[in-house]
Image: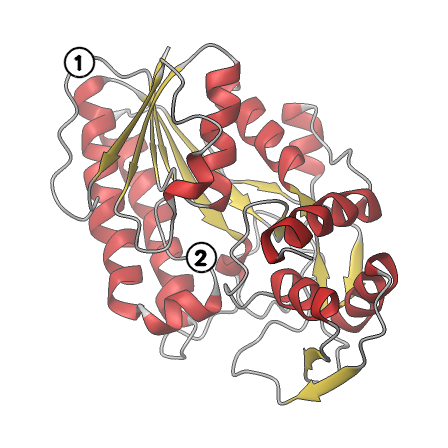
Amino acid sequence: MRVLVTGGAGFIGSHLCESLLGRGADVICMDNLITGSVDNLSTVAEHPGFRLARHDVTEYIDVKGPLDWVLHLASPASPRDYLELPIQTLKVGALGTHNALGLAKAKRARFLLASTSEVYGDPLVHPQREDYWGNVNPVGPRGVYDEAKRFAEAMTMAYHRTHRVDTRIVRIFNSFGPRMRLDDGRAIPAFMTQAIRGEPLTVFGDGSQTRSLQYISDLIDGIWRLMLSSVSEPINIGNPQEMTVLELAKRIIRLAGSRSEIVFHPLPEDDPKVRQPDIGRARTLLGWEPRVDIDEGLRMTLDWFRQRLGA
């Protein structure tokens, strides 16, 4: 099997490349390294079945030879990134998705769109099921990411219905693990870096907003199962175990053996108050559910952060 992974040098993409190579696939990782890093590919760089292609997918994509799968993960994904790169985020969701779908159509390849729980916005329905249309502010600062992914889903389904492209849509909920960027601005990297350094942990708002966290290996397993299935409608892949951001901060302090305090800063605009997937569809259609205990996943991630920080 020959696979193209766009955004393959990112946190999730690099784990996906590694998993696919381990399953015997040849993998082309396509990335312009705007938020990804070649460091994430150190475990696969010398693999005979791996190739890195530095390319911006908002430009025409040309891949020689056959392809069986096109997995489209390219996009800034943390609030810090897409607030700093709003136009690039919109372009990769629109032009990048169009180019990746065009390639899949030309190669008669199976296509996967890495979508996001952010398509639900600040939800009025809890937990979030795939048939919920969301509550998104299209002109708010987070709209560049939310609407890019919503548009990408619409384009994916248009290619599925009009051109009969064999498509998959995975709505990824908060995921964590090794290779997250130390400075990506999301809660777990920020909390872990601060706890390891003994600095105060920065919680936005009063910390009562909730998140549902899954370890990276569970996400990769869900994507693999989805690709092997015949499911074309969107599928939530996430952990339904919900916790507050304040609880997460306290848990990381405890697991890190840190003496850090917690400080509170104003809540960013349009920050979701709740986030919890309904995974009934994934359980029924894919036989999937998360298996890694949250504390165990946090411990493994803390170990990686300590190595990165030289602590």
Q: Are marks 1 and 2 in contact (CB under 8 Å)?
A: no
Type of the residue with mark 1: Gly
Type of the residue with mark 2: Ala
Would you place residue 304 above or below residue 71 in this image? Answer: below
Earlier in the chain: of badge 1 and badge 2, it is: 1
Position of the N terminus by quadrant: top left
Where, by quadrant of the figure, is residue 259 drawn? bottom right
Give whichever of 153, 300 is nearer the camera. 300
Judge whether residue 230 can be spotted in this image: no
The location of residue 179, given as percent across then percent down, is 54, 46
The location of residue 76, given as percent across then percent down, is 38, 57
Horizontally, is 249 left or right of 171 in the view?
A: right
Give whichever of 43, 296 is nearer the camera. 43
Q: Give the label on residue 77, or none.
A: 2
Label 2: state its secondary structure.
Answer: loop
Judge whether residue 153 can be spotted in this image: yes
Give whichever of 188, 4 is nearer the camera. 188
The location of residue 201, given as percent across then percent down, is 72, 76
Q: What coloring was used for the rendering?
A: secondary structure
Residue sitting at x 47%, y 68%? 79
Would you place residue 46 above or below residue 203 in this image? Answer: above
Residue sitting at x 46%, y 18%? 21
The location of residue 158, given as percent across then percent down, is 28, 39
Seen from this angle, which residue lies furthest bottom?
Answer: 266
Residue at mark 1: 65
Q: Give the label on residue 244, or none.
A: none
Position of the C terminus by quadrant: bottom right
Horizontally, is 282 left or right of 108 in the view?
A: right
Residue sitting at x 42%, y 63%? 146
Label 1: state its secondary structure.
Answer: loop
Horizontally, is 229 left or right of 284 in the view?
A: left
Would you place residue 24 above or below residue 18 in this image? Answer: above
